[in-house]
Amino acid sequence: MSDSIQLVVNIVGLPKVISDEIAGKLKKIEGVGARKVIYEPLLVPGNIESYKKKALEHLYRHILRLLDDQGHFPPNFLGVVTVVVGSDVLDASDIAKDYYVETLCDFTRELESKSYLRVPGNTKNRLCNEIFSDILTKVENSEAALKSIREEIVNNDNRTPLLLPVENFGEKKIASIVGGVQKLVSDGELSVQRLKAGIKSLRSSLSVKKINGKEHFVNDKKLAFVSPGSDRHGAIRAVQGASHDIKCFLRGRFRLGVPYDPRFHYDCKMLVGALQKDWSSCHGQRHKLASGRSHVNIAPNDYIR
């Protein structure tokens, strides 16, 4: 069954009183099995922090089920989209922080709890139909956009700014780039041409330096992120109970919803001054470089080696 799944649709923030009503319709989004719709129902009232953790773990478990014994996704697997249902009890922009880099995020209209708690049946039915229609539109737009993003991330990984690591390149700049792509998706269908034009515009905010005849991105600390070419190694394995947490794994496999080569990394070199010895790795753990190192390997999920 997992071999036929091309898209995971991850719905976050959907109140249980609504998900119970539209469960059958959500199942229909899956069609003949190419899509897998998952969601952790939101209890209202409830503990939001506990919900955020459970929702992230729910996605992680489903992603693990898609991997084969060698840690590979099915050959036709397109990726993961997250549809966030914001409300007066759940800040959409806050919960999206758990998914906005790893998955392709889009947002439905925001709900008010008074609009679905203790209301007449006809009113609730109308609201449920509207929410389902909104979710379906977001899924279809995001699925089309993933195909364009895949073209950029898979076939242009050595040159795209979309794989730059968040923490060690610069969180604000990567948030701007990722947010720019997410906005293109929210605004409508995203073609390859429109994505390339958008990336070209976003890329103008980044410094670029030619090294050995090839252009590479440079952060504000003058650290050059030299892409690896065909030299790929050192992926984080999907082993439960390992020292890495869920976000290390998800961010080490996905960018904007598209699975990328988990062996991809940058060979980073200082253009000015000495290379620092102490680094923050993927889940905040410290990593000290051996004496004499002239470069540091940094993966898109900030894993240091």
Image (tube, rainbow, N blue to C red):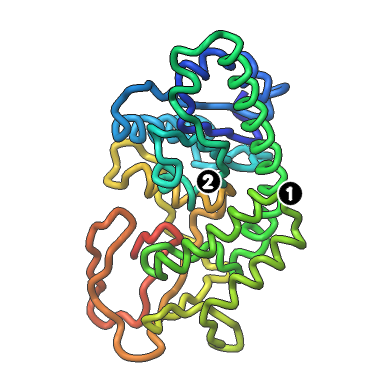
Secondary structure, mark 1, is loop
Q: Mark 2 = which residue? A: 103
Left or right side of 31 for 70: left
Secondary structure at numbered mark 2: loop
Q: Which of 133 and 111 is in front in this view?
A: 111
Is 195 situated above or below 186?
Answer: below
- The residue sitting at 31% across, 47% down in the picture is 244
What's the CA distance linking mark 1 and mark 2?
17 Å
The residue that appears at 55% across and 55% down in the rendered structure is 261
Q: Compared with residue 3, is residue 271 higher up or lower down, i.e. above or below?
A: below
Q: Where is residue 133 in the image (x, y as percent from the top left)?
A: 67, 28
Image point 41% across, 45% down: which residue?
98
- Residue 85 location, x and y as percent? 51, 34
In the picture as drawn, the residue positioned furthest to the bottom comes out as: 272
Residue 271 location in percent, x, y?
41, 88
What's the residue at 64%, 32% (across, down)? 134
**Label for residue 189?**
1
**The image quarter in which residue 296 lies:** bottom left
Question: Total marks drawn?
Answer: 2
Q: In this view, does 24 lie to the left or right of 278?
A: right
Q: Any mark on residue 276, and which?
A: none
Q: In which quarter of the image is the N terminus?
A: top right
Q: Is residue 150 above or below residue 38?
A: below
Q: Where does residue 223 sit, x and y in percent of width and height?
A: 40, 80
Q: How crowded is the residue under tag 2: few (<14 C-alpha within 10 Å), some, or many (20+)?
A: many
Amino acid type, mark 1? Glu
Q: What residue type is labelled 2?
A: Thr
Along the line of sight, which residue is nearer the eye, 125 or 134? Answer: 125
Q: Identify whether 277 is placed above or below 34.
A: below
On screen, residue 180 versus residue 293, left or right, reads right
